[in-house]
Image (spheres, rainbow, N blue to C red):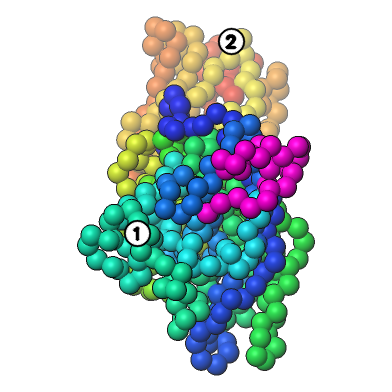
Amino acid sequence: MSRPLAAQANTVPGLTAALTDASGLRILGRRGLGHPGGEVAIAFSTTTCNLGTANIQWDGPMAPRHPVFAFSIVREIDGRLEQISDPDAAFVKHAFGVGLPSSCGGPCQPTGLGLGPNCSDVYNAFTNGNRFFLGPRQEVDPWLGIWEPVGSYFDRGDPDVGLPGNSDGQRSLFQNSANFPTDPVQNRLAVGEADLVAADRLWFCCQIVVRGEDGDLRRDNLGYREFTADWAEPNWTLTEIGAWRRGSVLENWNGAVVETARNGEDDGHFFVASHVTQLGPTTWRYDYAAQNFDNARGAAALRIPLCAGASLANVRFRDANANALDDWTHARVGPELAFLAGPTNPLDWHSFYSFSFETDVPPSPGEVTLDQARIGPGALAVSLPAPVPAPAARITFYGAGCGSPHPVLSSNGPPRVPTPGFALKVATVPHAPGLLLVSLGADSIPLGNGCVQHLESTVLITHGFFAADPNGIALSPFPIPNDPVLEGLRLYWQAARIVAGGPMLGAASLSNGLELLLSCR
């Protein structure tokens, strides 16, 4: 579970950035043989606005304090969302200086020290695709915004210049070496042509990471815009649709429920989108997309409640690379379905993975849990609300009792499978005798004098007799064994106190009705 702490580390008061626009899609190169067997490198312009009162430091790439930009491409296919650009291959853009800032929302206050309050800065597509300023995503801590230039990709060079030059804090990656003339796609935002062709819808996405920005103010650091991709030999035509929208692209998934949570003040946010489709009278498909927005420790597992008695079919995982050897595996672990990462493929920032399966259990409100992948401050996992195929065990009171006083029927806890010590609880007068009745359905049958039978009569069973203790409490054991067949079973109960002159046939008073839903959680 996530937990809050006192304060987020390294927050700079008044620091608030926003990505206010992205546009101008361009193809900067292509590799591969005949269409659609190749890959294309895509870039686009970005506009950043300082909405706060503090300057945003915007030093050059070998200085540690500057924003970085991450880029991705997402598609919808067969009702699912998938990231189709490899976040490890698509390097992030290191900002290198503010040009001639313009106003955004108020008078621009340029200072010469970075991006001043109410000032905006634009990087065009060619600048964002210039590999002289592109470095690996893994070097950046997205929660704290920290990047260390010493020993970085820029310091090492490409190819690596070796010691001592690869760890002296001086740029070894020079403009001529960063152009990679034989590979126009390397390190850029790349996507396979086959993935473009198969897409039902497409979006380009961007995220800015600003060192010291409070985690509560970052929702507008992320956004997306829809586009189309059309091929006419020998070129692609990319056409933007609609306006730039701030937030997670998962929010554009029709029919999905999107939730977000973070690891308190210790680490960043995850989004989880959930989409449930009924395929038949007793079959449901569950689709989840888990996105790491700015969580530095990453995620190594997605855990979804799934009772042992539920069916499971057509389990599917999709990440953003083409390496099937590092796909997450799945296993049923107790009352859950767990998708588990290998050691080389955690869910890191600015990426999302897709998960899908089919089962015979309809959706119920619940939680899914993401295990953190690395050791670090904060909790071991982050949980988010989501529809899940495992109803929570519950008790429901319905209908009124009769008599003065009438017995009150409840239980000693939730009816989970298994609960060996489960019992029905009757609150009545001291030493009162009575009996418990159980049925497979509820009903409302008038019996006269205000008494109502709340149980369906077709299968109506006497569970047993009870006698209240000196405090007027009777516990009737009903042990629930570890049997998956019981998961999802509903039982309906009512208690009758035996009393001379009672309102029911002059012999008893009746309790409320009690519905039990047995489940694994």
Q: Is residue 438 above or below residue 507?
A: below
Q: Residue at x 29, y 54 (%)?
A: 168
**Crowd band around label 2 with a 10 angstrom C-alpha radius: few (<14), some (14–19), many (20+):** few
Q: Is residue 109 magenta?
A: yes
Residue 109 percent across, percent down from the top left: 69, 37
Type of amino acid under label 2:
Pro
User: Where residue 155 is drawn, which disc sits there?
Assistant: 1
Quarter of the rendering occupied by the N terminus: top left
* Element on which disc 2 rests: loop
Residue 84 at what x, y percent from top left? Answer: 53, 69
Q: Is residue 50 left or right of residue 362?
A: right
Residue 487 can be seen in this image? no
Considering every residue shown, the one lying at the far left of the view is 163
Quarter of the image where the C terminus is located: top left
Q: Nearer the viewer, residue 31 or 152?
A: 152
Disc 1 marks a residue whose amino acid type is Asp
Q: Estimate the spatial distance between the alpha carbons at disc 1 and disc 2, rounded to whole Å.
A: 82 Å
Q: Residue at x 49, y 9 (%)?
A: 429
The magenta stretch spans which residues? 96-120
Q: Which mark is residue 405?
A: 2
Classified by dominant secondary structure, the portion drawn in magenta counts as: loop
Q: Position of residue 92 (x, y in %)?
A: 49, 59
Q: Is residue 211 visible?
A: yes
Q: Secondary structure at mark 1?
A: helix
The picture quadrant where one finds residue 46 is: bottom right
